[in-house]
Image (cartoon, rainbow, N blue to C red):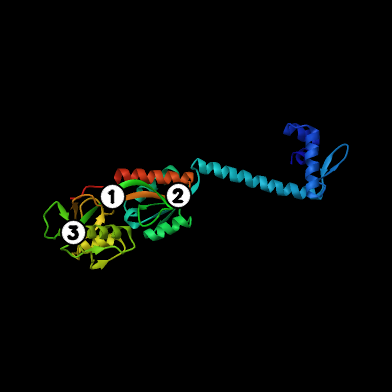
Amino acid sequence: MAVADLGSFSGASARLHRSPAAVSTHVQQLEAELGVRLFDRTTRRVALTPEGRLLLGRCRTVMAELDDVSRELGDRSQLRRGHVSLGTVPSISGLHLPAALAELKTRHPGITLELHEGSMSSIHHDLRERTTDFAIAAEFGDARDLSHQPVLSDPFVAVLPKNARFEGRSISLPELARYDQLAQPRDTAVRASVEQAFRAAGLAFSPTIEVAHHQTVLNMVAAGLGVAVLPMICVPTGPQRGYRVVALRPRGLAREICIITVRGKMLSPAAAECARLIAGTLKTHGTHRAA
């Protein structure tokens, strides 16, 4: 390209800090490899052949694209641009995730976001298919190909109707088992943890109503349809309407909220920053005290 731009081997050699003989040899080797002449040489000037003009045009296109890619990669490394695809479950996304994502957009407005909500099975599938960069969720099932970085221990609490005949500040599972149980479906990590806790206490767990979303569970508790055991993080803080939150006795039933990635996969700068902000938000605001 330097020879074509300057019209001489001597000018190109000066720009490239190489001898004219070295530049000429390089061009001759390229012509031999391609099987065409790229330059018409005279004693006064060097001119491109039609094949040389074709190659020069393609080279300029490639160099422009390389410059664009270089700028874009620089923007991504400096978090001026980027895209993050995140997987999570409704019990986490509804309350504390929006604040973390809002902070990310405030700090780095050039980063675009894509949120995938679903069951743990779908979250694991999306990670393995590289549909998502990482997920924020609890450990669940056999996932040895996934890496889990613990962020927060999220204790389970009992949620009772406000008019329930119970006055204590904590409740045991045998006491809770006297009420009708409301629960999420079997393919959720929350349901699996609750069922396991009841079995460990020697109790049957047979919900009278199953619903997918934790907010629906809370609304049904408030309507007096039963009680529920839910992670504290998905129970809104502040004055409750129609239900009360009671600590479980003995304490200890909890789930680990983790940043989940495919084992061995390195996050992009944008995804790593997003994961960092989410972890910080959950650690700061993720739990509150049960009544």
Residue 178 is drawn in which quadrant? bottom left
Dot placed on the residue nearer the N-terminal end, 3 or 2? 3
Q: CA distance from mark 2 to mark 1?
A: 24 Å
Q: CA distance from mark 3 to mark 2?
A: 40 Å
Q: Position of residue 110 (x, y in %)?
A: 48, 46
In the picture, measured across the screen, residue 271 lies left or right of residue 68, that is left
Amino acid carrying label 2: it is: Arg
Label 1: which residue?
154
Foreground pick, 23 / 55: 23
Name the front one of labels 2 and 1: 2
Name the front one of labels 3 and 2: 2
Amino acid carrying label 1: it is: Asp
Q: Position of residue 109 (x, y in %)?
A: 45, 45
Label 3: which residue?
160
Q: Quadrant of the N terminus?
A: top right
Label 2: which residue?
263
Task: Classify 285 as above or below 9.
Answer: below
Q: Position of residue 240 (x, y in %)?
A: 20, 55
**SS for dot 2:** loop
Mark 3 surroundings: few (<14), some (14-19) or many (≥20) residues within 10 A? many
Q: Position of residue 215 (x, y in %)?
A: 28, 59
* Res 263 seen here: yes
Mark 2 surroundings: few (<14), some (14-19) or many (≥20) residues within 10 A? few
Amino acid carrying label 3: it is: Leu
The outermost residue toward the bottom is 208
The outermost residue toward the right is 43
**SS for dot 1:** strand
Dot placed on the residue nearer the N-terminal end, 2 or 1? 1
Foreground pick, 109 / 262: 262
In the picture, measured across the screen, residue 169 lies left or right of residue 25, that is left
In the picture, measured across the screen, residue 275 lies left or right of residue 201, that is right
